[in-house]
Every structure is written in C-alpha cells, then in structure tokens.
Image (cartoon, helix red, strand yellow):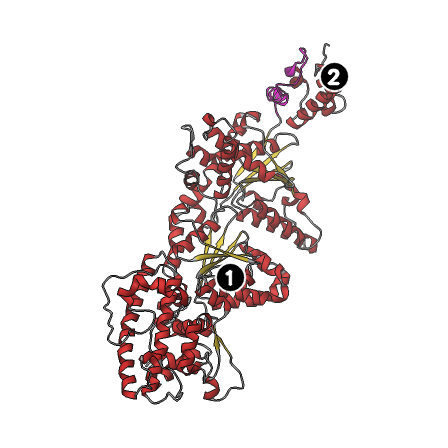
Amino acid sequence: MINHFLPYDFQKSSRKSMRSGDRGVCGPMGGPPKPGEHVMATTRINPFASNLDYLTDKLDLLTRLTRIRRLQQVAEGLETNEKADIRDLDSPEKPRKPVAAARARERMAQWKEDLQAHERRVTKTLALGKVALPLEQLGTEHKLDAFEKNVLAVLIGADMDPGFLKALEDMGGYKRGIREIRTLLILLCDDTAGRIHARRYFVHDAALLTGGLLNLSYSRDMNSETEFMSMDLAVPRRIASLILGEQDLDEGVMAFSSVVEPEVSLDQVVLPPEKLEEVLGLVRNRNRYLEARKEWGFDRILKYGRGTVIMFCGPPGTGKTMLAHALAKEAGCRLMLADLRQVVNHSRHDMGENLQRMFHEARILNAVLFFDEADEMFTDRCANEFMPTLLREMEKMDGVCILATNRPQILDEALERRILYRMDFELPSPALREQIWRKHLPAEARIADDVDFTALAEEFEFSGGFIKNAILTAFTLVLQRPPAEQHLTHADLRNAARTQIRNRLRGQVGRVEPRAAIGDLVLPATEKRQVEEIIAATRQRQKVFSTWGFGKMPGIGRGITALFSGAPGAGKTLAAEVIAHELSYGMHAVALSSLLSQYVGETEKRIDALFADVRDDGTLLLIDEADALFGARLERDGHHAHYINQQVNVLLHALERHDGLVVLTTNRPGDFDPAFKRRIRYHIEFPQPDATARAAIWRCQLPPAAPLAPNVDLSALARAYELTGGHIRNAVLRAAFAAATDGGVITHKMLVTEAAREAGPGKESRIGFHE
C-alpha cells in the first residue's frame, strides 16, 4: 500500500529550538523514541509558527521514516551491508530479524501518531490563515494528494538537508540513485502493491509533470521497466523556491509582469449590483464548477476550457482594474499583472516560451492573470504569429484570466471564442457617480459642510478614475492654504473637476476647452429653450437609457444627436460650446471634409478613429460642414456613387452606435438626406439675429475690461448693420487691435469701420458718428 504520510522539511539545525513547544503534540522530533520511552499526545494543538517550522517538522518525519524502512529491510533480510551501523536499534551488536521487526512496528505506530498530530497542526495553521504553507497551498491548487506532496518533500529535503540525504543512503539509496523513482517508491510505499499503484504518479499526464512541478529524465529510447524505475526526478528551482517560502516572481517573467497582493475589497467597487453579482458568481463558484465538470462528464467531452476567461470592456477609468483586484481578493488569490506590450518587445524569439512561463507562474502562485489593454497584443501584426501560443495557454489553464480592453470591436474572433464571460463597463449613472465621490473621500478627510456630492455627480459625467484625480487635485491645492483653512469645500472639488476637463483637452488636436456659458448665448426664446432641452436630456441620459431601460429597446441608440443649421456666424458653434460648458464636457471640433479621403477604406478608418477618441470620454463631438457628406445619396450607378453612399452609411452607423453627445452643423439643411434626418433627435434652426439680438451680441463681445470711448452706441451699430454673431466678433476684435495699436480706447468710429468691412461693399456710411 501507499503510505500517505507528509511532506518534507529542512534546516535541521533549527529543529531543536522549534521542537520544544510541540513535544506534547508530535512526540520527539529529533529521532525515534528510545527503548521504553512513550510520549503521550495532548489535546492541545499548536499551529506552526512559520513555514520553516512546518518544513522542519516534515523533514523530521521523513528522516524517521527512512530509518523505519531500514529496520524493515533488516527484518526481511534485505540488509546486506555487514559493517553498517544501524543506530536505530541502540545496540552495538548486529540485530536479529525478530528484534528489527518488532522495533519497526513500534516505531511505525509512534510515527503514525506523530503524523496525525502534524496533520492537525497543518489544518489549524491553514484555518487561522496567519502563516502561509506554500507546499500545502501548491497541493490544493494542483489537486495533489499526500503521495505527490511527499515526492516533492523528499526531493527538496535531499537537496537541503545532509542528514536526510545520509538517511536515504543508509536506507539503500547509495546502491541506487537517491532521486530515482525506485528509491521514492521504496520509501513512500509499504508493499509491492502500493509501489505498482504509485507508478501512475510518474507518467506523462500525471499532475506533477503536467503542472510543471517535477522534471523527469525521460528518454524516448526507454523501453524497459528497469529504465523507467531508474529515471531521476528533480524539482524545478522555481518550484523549490516557492515551497521554501520565496514568494517573489520568477526572474524570467519579471520584465513583463508583476504580482501583487490585491487590497481592493468589493465594497470599494461601485458598479450596478446585477452586473457585479454575475461576475462574482463565476469566481466564487470556481471550485464547484471544476468539480461539476468532472461529475457531469464535461471533462471527458471537453478536454480544454477549464479556466474562467473574463473580458472587461469599457473606457478608461470605469473600474476594470479595480474590479480585477477585488475579484482576486475575493477568490483568495494574488493578482498577476501582465504587460502584453512588454511581452512582445522583450524578446521576440522567446515570446512563445515567455507566454508559457507567464501562465505557469500564475498557476503556481495561485494568481489571477490580468491582461490590461489586451488590444495591444491582438492588433500587433508582428505578435499575431504568437496568437496560437497565447490561445493554447488560455485553453490549458484552469484558473482565472481577465482581459481588459477599451476597444473590444478590434479583437480577433479567435479570442472572442475563448471568452467565457464579457462584462461591459459604462460611464456610471449620477447615482453611482455620487457613491464614487463619497467612497474616494476617507472618513478622516476634512470636508466642509457645503460639499454637495449630488450636484458634483450630476454636473460632471466622470468615470471613477477622473473623480479620483479631481479629489486628489483638490486635496493637493488645499494643503497650500494655512492650516486653519485646510478643508475641502464644494468650490475646491468643483474647480478640481474642471481642471480634469482642461487636462484631457490639452495638447489634443481638435480639442476645445469650452468657456461660453448659457448667459453668453443670444438667441430667441424658442431656440434657447431647445438648447437648454439638449443640456437637460444629456444630463438625464443615463437614467433614461440605463435605469429606465430605453437603451435596450430595439432601434433606439443611446446617444444624443443634434443638428444645428443656419447661416455662417449665426451662433451654431457657440451654442455647441455653451452646451459643453454647461455639462462640464470637453469639446472636439472637426470639419467633416477632413475625414473624407479618396483612398478606399481610409474614410472609414478616420471615422472609426474619431469616434473611438471621444467614446465615453465626457466630450461633445462637433462635426462641422456635415452637408459635405450628408447630402442626398447618389442614385446613379457607378463606382463613385457607390463609394460616396458607403461613406454615408459608415458615418450613420457610427452615429447610431455612439452613446455620447454629437452636434452637427450645416449651412444647407435642405440638402440633407431624409434618411439622415430621421436619426437626429434635435434640430435647431439658428435665425438671423434681429436688431435687439444684435445689440445684445455686441455687448457680449465687449469684455468689461475693454476701454470704450463714451460715444460708443451699440444699439446704433445693431440697427445699422445686419451682422451675425460671428461677424460682430470679428469687427470687435479688429477694432480692439486698432485701439491697442493707437494706444487709446475703442471708439465708435473704429467699430463702425470694422462693422462696415464685415457687412461688405456699400455699407460703409450707413450711420454717422461723432468723435
């Protein structure tokens, strides 16, 4: 039979000091009891103080077992070394067989009692959770039984402890290889039947070999049982280091991955409860899932796919990484952060091997493997040659692997088929944003009474990442004030949030920082109400589409799309800027003509890139000159007509899929394709301003600090020149430059001159003026 005892141990020199507190539990650990000595086990169970304490106890048991095996060999007449000093019998004379047999039975009985005591200590240590026992954890993760753990213990013990090595030699290992299969079977099995049964632990599909826990000197030319039994076994250095308590990452994969102890708890994650429960169920029920696969026969039919591969899709800052940390902690695992870009760049010719090592390392460390920005790997043409290796490793794994991406639509279909569960992350609703604001402020933080989290959540459509940045920015600025004034006010948090918007816009082509407020917009009451309606609808977008479920209705997009039509300078762009400012959005302005290309497929790429750039980014997308593409579709045949219509369809599809805010402008609304107009939720026609509106625009364009001459009559200018807001702005700026050049003030004459230039020929002398 197989003797399912325990694993190994070392640091023999430390045994004596570690033994004293456990004699009542495990008996004398320094060797077998002397004749007549009997040690009673007590009911008190002391957990192991450290992994070294545990390993030392294991190796003591193994050493004693080798001596018991030697006694058994003497009793069976197998001991042939006449000069051997068999110290276990405490006799200077060569023992007789009956004496050896009796003492072997006595010491085996005591050894089994000590083994049970050891196992109770292991159970208590693991239950307390204060001391890690890597060998036991490795056994749990790889589903090893006691025999397999003992194999690892014997091999490491032979390398680490000269005393144990000598005991193996005394048992007869000097006649065979110390690390041969035969030697291990003689030590760990009680009889021939047990040794025959235990051969299965060393075949190619055994857990020790498939898990990379054991190296075997296998030869394809081996064709006899003698050669099989003579094969040497060795524990890989990485596994030995892990068992010895070295929890650091393998040096070979440190260049492109790292392992952390997750510290994010589930109560810190703010996500819709129903989504959180689904993904939690996959992680919490992993062990039951693996057991049920075997019970229900899935393992027999599906030889792969035992792992749980989860994909997180969503914009940056929406909680993908935070949830990965929380799931790993919930599962009692570490988190292995894999940088696929570094995997590709580190050593291309070793990339396949590096991927294998990374998955293997995650398994032996009991880590959830997390690939952030997974699209970096799956869109790199040079990396595609390694795609089969990556997919194969994903199929072989039986742990948890999480991939995160901002662009799921570009991932390879071969990967999609390996995804067990996909979770889409969206910008949080106002209610969830309020929770995020609150959770990011510690209880110890000095917060003023005027802070209105509800208002902050409604004003700033931020992801959790930007909320965190806003809070830390406000905190940093508050520390610059005198100690008595160091508390976070609503204004501090609001200003810091607006800083986040400016930071996102800085340095990006086409990005505009909105500055115009609703009070700067001069429009008739009806059109102004329409602008305010767009602002209100955008603020309630999450509630209507997500909470109320309208976003799941067929044929209803989740975005807000508006068309502003009117003459040049009528205020279309200004209105878009006002909307963005009131929503605390950034604004990305682009002329539609700049997206069009004569090369096949290039327009589609530009459109996809544009919408990807502003997707879920709290950004208003302003598409100017929309009539450049959205005129009535060409009905005539021909390649050109087909190509133009195809471009129209691409943009229409992008608008339907986009769940943000898009404003299109045109000077020619009559030319628009009716199919396009049906996709527009709001259409505002900007009229030419009347005299009253023009006077208001003149006043808005002159800042309070501008030096005006007393004779400036804005009402007269408004009556005399039928200008749009854009023309008025140009006239005011040129007059200001002229005044600055002259070193004086802005005069009525200067404004008249510039207004006449904007109005065109024949308008120069419509009104008079006095200096």
With respect to residue 148, does 425 lie above or below?
A: above
Side of 258 relative to 48 (left or right): right
Residue interval drawn in magenta: 689-715
Determine the secondary structure under disc 1: helix
640 magenta-colored = no
Q: Residues within 10 Å of mark 1 (few under 14, many from 20)?
A: few
The disc placed on residue 416 is 1
Q: Quadrant of the N terminus?
A: bottom left
Task: Tell me the quarter of the picture where residue 546 sits.
Answer: top left
- Where residue 60 sits: x, y (%)? 36, 70
Visible residue check, residue 123: no
State the quadrant of the C terminus: top right
Image vertical order of residue 212 relative to residue 682, above or below:
below
Amino acid residing under circle 2: Gly
Residue 109, image quadrant:
bottom left
- Residue beneath disc 2: 743
